Image: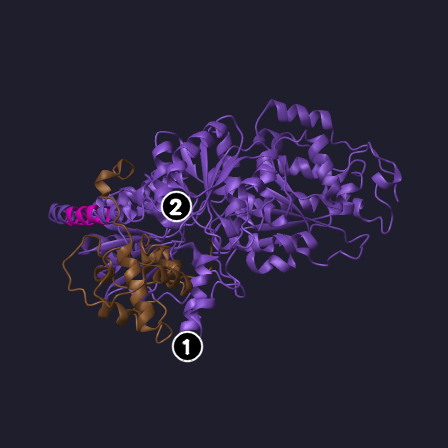
Amino acid sequence: MVGATLLILAIPAARVQAQQPAPTVDTAPAGNIENGKQAFKKFGCYACHGYSGHGGLSPSQRAGPRLATNPIPFPAFVRYVRQPGGRMPPYGDQVTDAELADIYAFLKSVPPSPDPKSIPLLND
Amino acid sequence: MEKPEKSSFDRRSFLKTVAAGSAAGLVANAQAMSPQQTEQVGTGGEAATASETGLSGERPGSDFMLDVIKPLGFEYLTILPHSDSRGLQESIINYGGNRNPELITCLHEEACVAIAHGYFKIEGKPLAALIYGSVGLQHAAMAVYSAFCDRVPVYLILGNNVWDPNSRSVQDAAGMVRDFTKWDDAPVSLGQFAESAVRAYAVAMTPPLMPVALTVDKRLQEQPIAKGAKLRIPKLSSNTPPQGDSGAVSEVARLLVNAELPVLAVERAARTEAGLKYLVELAELLQAAVTDTIQRMNFPSRHPLNQDGSVMGRADVILALEHPQLSRSSLKPGAKLISISSYDLFTRSNYWDFGRYQEADLAIAADAEATLPSLIEEVKRLITSDRRRAFEARGATLTEARRRATEQNRIRASSGWDDSPISTARISAELWAQIKNRDWSLVSRSDSMNGWPQAFWKFEKYYHHIGQSGSVGIGYSAPASVGAALANRKYGRLSINLQNDGDLMFLPGVLWTAAHHRIPMLTVMHNNRAYNREVMLVQRAAAQRHRDISRCHIGTAIDDPNIDYAKLAQSMGWYAEGPIADPKELGPAIRRALAVVDRGVPALLDTITQPT
C-alpha cells in the first residue's frame, strides 16, 4: 500500500458521512445485496471506501468517507456517483442504475459499527 | 612501482590516541604529513597495487583514510562489498577493528543509503555508505534523491578505479548524483582526501543538510603510504546554522503578535528535539494554530493547538517554517504569507525538490530552527496584556476545535472495527494499547497505516516518529526503518515499523540485514495486496477518459499469488506470524511478537488490511 501521488476522494463529509442513523425517505429501488457487494469491488469503490464502505481517516490520507449502513438518499447517491465533486472519479454512465441500486442495497446491509464509547482501545 | 617504505605514521601511536581520548585529541595528536609527499603515492601509472605484489604488511593509504574518517564520529558504515573499495573495507575490519565505524552489511546499495537516511533521523548524525561508484551508485541513486529531498545528510564513499580501469570504471562517479547531492569530490592524493573528507562532513551537516559524495580511488587505498609522508588530519570546523536577519525577524514577530488568527505551518521545521521545544513555546506564546505536514517530528500530536489544514483558509498570517511548497492558493485573499526556510539557500535545477514558486510577503532565507529563539524573544517583547487576553480566547477556540476533531476521529475509527480484513484504525489502536507505556519510536513513514497513529498515538518526543521519505518514492520505508531501529537500539527503545506491502518488496533483503546485525524491531504489515493508491489514480484516469473503470486492478494488484510475508521474514531470521485477517487475533499476536523483540530479535506480523 504505497503510492507516489495524492488522490483525495472528497465527497463532502457532511453529505455522506452519516455516522448516526437519521430519518430519511427511502426511495431506493430494491437491490441485490450480494450483487452490490461484487459491484462495489468490481468498480473499485473499495479502494477509497474500504471493502464494506466504512471509509477512512480523512481526504488528506487519500481515504473516502464512510458510506455504509446509512448512506445519503438514493437519488443524491446516484447523482454523486455520476458527477462527483472533489477528486472522486466521475463514474458517468459506466455504472447502470440497477448496479447502483445493488450497491446501495449492499451499503445499507452492512452491520452498524459499535459505539466508539464502547471500545476501550479508542478511549485512551 | 616505487618500493613502499614504512610510514612515520605509527599505528600503535594512533591506537593509543584513540584509546586515550576524544576525536579532538586524535586530531591534535595526528602526525603531520605533507600533501606533496603523499602525492607520490598516486604516481605509479599502471603498476600493480601493493596487495597484488605481495607487499601487504606496509601501511596502505586506506589506513590513513580510516584515520581521517574515524574522528568524524561515524558509528556505522553501510556497505555492499565491491572490488574498488576492498582496501578501505579491509582497513575498517582489521586496522580499525570494525568499530566506529562498524560495517553494516547490506544486500542492495539503495538499502545502504536508505538505512543511513533512517538512522540520521533518530540519531542526528550521518552514517557513511560505502558503495561501488559505477554500478552500485546506480542502484543507490533513488535513495540518494530521497535523502536530498528530505534534507538528510548521507556520507557517500564511492569506490572507483581510474588508474587501472576496467569495463565498469567511471570517469566521474559522483556525476550521476550531482543533481541531488550538495557537494562531491574525487581526491587524487591522501592529503587531498583528508581535506575533502572533513570538508564533505562539514558541508553535509550545515543547513540545508544534504548528502555528499567522496570518490575514493582503488589505487589510492591500496598503495603504501610514502616514506616520510607528513599527512595531517584537518580539524572539523562545525558551521553554525544561518539565522534570520534581526530586522526581518522583528517584523515577523510584529505580524504574528498582531494577527487575528496566525498559523504556524511546519514541514521540516524541527531538525532536533530543541526545534520541537521552540515550536511548542512559540505556538503557546501566541496561542497560534499549528498545521504539520509531519515531515519531521515538529509538534506534539495531541497538543490542542495542533490543527488540521482547514484552519489555513481562515488565517490572516501564516508563518511557513521550512515549508516551501505551501501554496498561496490555499490561503484566504489578503492573508500574509511569511517564510523562513533554508531551501532558499541552496537550489538545484534539474531534479526538483521544490514546487511552484512561493509568493511570500516576507521570505527569510535562513534555518528555521536556528531562527526560532530570536523570534520567540521578539514575540515575548511585543506581547501586551490586551493581546494576551485575545490570545487566550483564541486558544480556547482552537482547543475546542481540536477536541471536536479528536471525537470525529474516534467515530471514524470505530467504523468497521470488527471487519476482516482488519481496519488500519484497529491495528493502530491495538498497537498503541501495548506500546503506550514503553519508550517507543515509530520508524516507518509518519503517515503509515493511513495516518491513524497520528490521530491517536501520543507523539511528543523527537524520536517518536521519523517523518516521511522526502521523495515520496516507494522502497524507502523498509530500509529507513532498519536504519532508525539501528539508531534506537543503544537507547533500548522499542522500534515500531508499520510496513506497506509494496514498499517491502523493493528491498526485502533489509530483513536479513536487521536479523544479521541483531536489530530489534516490530514490523506490522499494512498488507492490502496492492499498490492501492495507484488503483485510485488509474481509476481517475479511466473515468476522465470514459473508459472501463473496473479493470484498474491490472498492474496495481499484488495478488495471485499472495505474498507470504511471514515466510519471507522467517527465511531471513525473523520471528513472524501471519497472515492475520481476524482482528480478534491481533492483540495476542502483538503481545507474542513484542516478547520476541524484547529478546533482541526482529519480529513481523503479516496483517491483512483494509485498503484505506
Q: Residue drawn at (80%, 39%), measured in percent from left and top?
A: B226
**Residue drawn 50% across and 42% down?**
B481
Q: CA distance from mark 1 to mark 2?
A: 33 Å
Q: Is residue A91 above or below residue B195?
A: below
Q: Is residue B92 magenta?
A: no
Magenta residue span: B394-406
Residue B456 vs residue B98: left or right?
left
Left or right: B194, with B480 as reference point: right
Prevalent SS, magenta region: helix
Residue B455, image x, y percentages: 31, 46
Question: In the rendered image of this protein, does residue B112 appear above or below residue B541?
Answer: above
Q: Residue B509: x and y, percent?
A: 61, 44
Q: Quadrant of residue B589?
A: top left
> Badge 2 sits on which subunit?
B
Q: Are marks 1 and 2 on the same chain?
A: yes
Looking at the rendered structure, the secondary structure element under dot 1 is loop
Q: Is residue B332 left or right of residue B564?
A: left
Q: Is residue A96 visible?
A: yes
Q: Report which quarter residue B403 is drawn in.
A: top left
Q: Is residue B339 visible?
A: no
Chain of the residue on which disc 1 is drawn: B
Q: Tell me the crowding category of disc 2: few under 14, some 14 to 19, or many 20 or more residues within 10 angstroms, Cα based.
A: many
Q: Residue at x 36, y 44 (%)?
A: B453
Question: In screen coordinates, is A52 left or right of A112?
Answer: right
Residue B402 counted in the magenta span: yes
Residue picked out by circle 1: B546
> Pointer 2: what residue?
B422
Question: As rendered, which of B155 and B519 lies closer to the eye?
Answer: B519
Chain corresponding to purple in the figure: B
Chain identifier of the brown chain: A
